[in-house]
Amino acid sequence: MEKTNEKLELIEKYFNDFSEIQSAQLTELFSLYTEWNEKINVISRKDIDSLYLKHVLHSLSIAATFPFVTGMEVIDLGTGGGFPGIPLAIFFPEVKFLLADSIAKKVKVVSEISSAIDLKNVEVFCGRVESIKSKKFDFAVSRAVAPLKDLWSWSKPLLRKERKMEDYKNGLICLKGGDLTQEIADSQLRPYVTEIETVFNEEYFKGKYILYVPV
């Protein structure tokens, strides 16, 4: 437990207004992911000790940049082990999240972890997002699962036009790293790009970005 709390200090370095429930949920993530990772490899095993930096805080860079509001609906495209969706769902308990992935064993992990920490605002979906026809969302989020061009083609049909935030139109928000020049050119989009290092002053985030494409 001491090890876990020590790591949670990294999150609390940038966020200091968590409720007791949120703090408990964040704390429990370490033991849950450690346990599940021994059964199903959803996080690189060498990364498990860096869970709060490389996965939780990275996911929360979206929360630090986009103030989602009560009643919003967000889809996490290719959620994998639950990132960025699970940390965002903890941070925004009044926002509904659909965590989608086509790999059943990953969806099972996400479902079990969400249930274990009693995340009431999370649903999971196993399948290709192109098959979702009856739901609309305010935002799509994703973390490095596909080129920007593909993420936009998958998310655009799912995004509603009417917005709930005054300062931001609905759209796609994705976490990416490295030289994105060619990927952005191939997408024929003009995303807003935020350097995560300007949000969280940590060496790990050098060369990592938030891309935002409004509808």
Image (cartoon, rainbow, N blue to C red):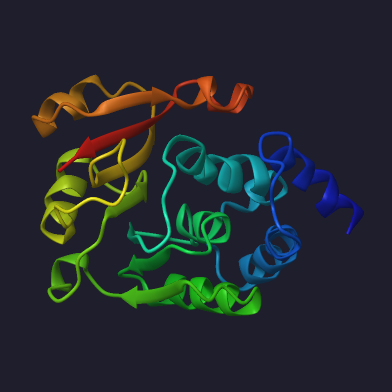
Q: Please tell me whether residue 210 is drawn above or below residue 30 in the rendered image.
A: above
Q: How many marks?
A: 0
Q: Nearer the viewer, residue 72 or 26?
A: 72
Where does the N terminus fall, quadrant-wise? bottom right
Q: Is residue 31 visible?
A: yes
Query: What's the residue at 78%, 45% (across, down)?
Result: 7
Residue at the location (32% across, 45% down)? Answer: 165
The location of residue 97, given as percent across then percent down, is 40, 65
| Viewer-nearest residue: 141 or 65 | 65
Of all residues, the one furthest to the front in this rendering is 166
**Does residue 9 appear to the left or right of 200 in the view shown?**
right
Residue 57 percent coordinates (x, y): 59, 42
Quadrant of the snapshot with the C terminus: top left
| Left/right of residue 161 with respect to residue 39 in the rendered view | left
Q: Quadrant of residue 166?
A: top left
* Residue 46 in view in this figure: no
**As drawn, is 70 to the left or to the right of 86?**
left
User: Residue at 69% across / 46% down in the picture?
Assistant: 17
Q: Position of residue 90 (x, y in %)?
A: 57, 60
As drawn, 9 above or below 122: above
Q: In which quarter of the view is residue 182 placed? A: top left
Location of residue 39 with respect to 45 vertically, above or below: below
In the rendered structure, the answer to whether residue 28 lies left or right of residue 59 reads: right
Q: Nearer the viewer, residue 208 or 162?
A: 162
Q: Is residue 141 above or below residue 96?
A: above
Q: Residue at x 49, y 43 (%)?
A: 63
Quadrant in the picture for residue 135 = bottom left
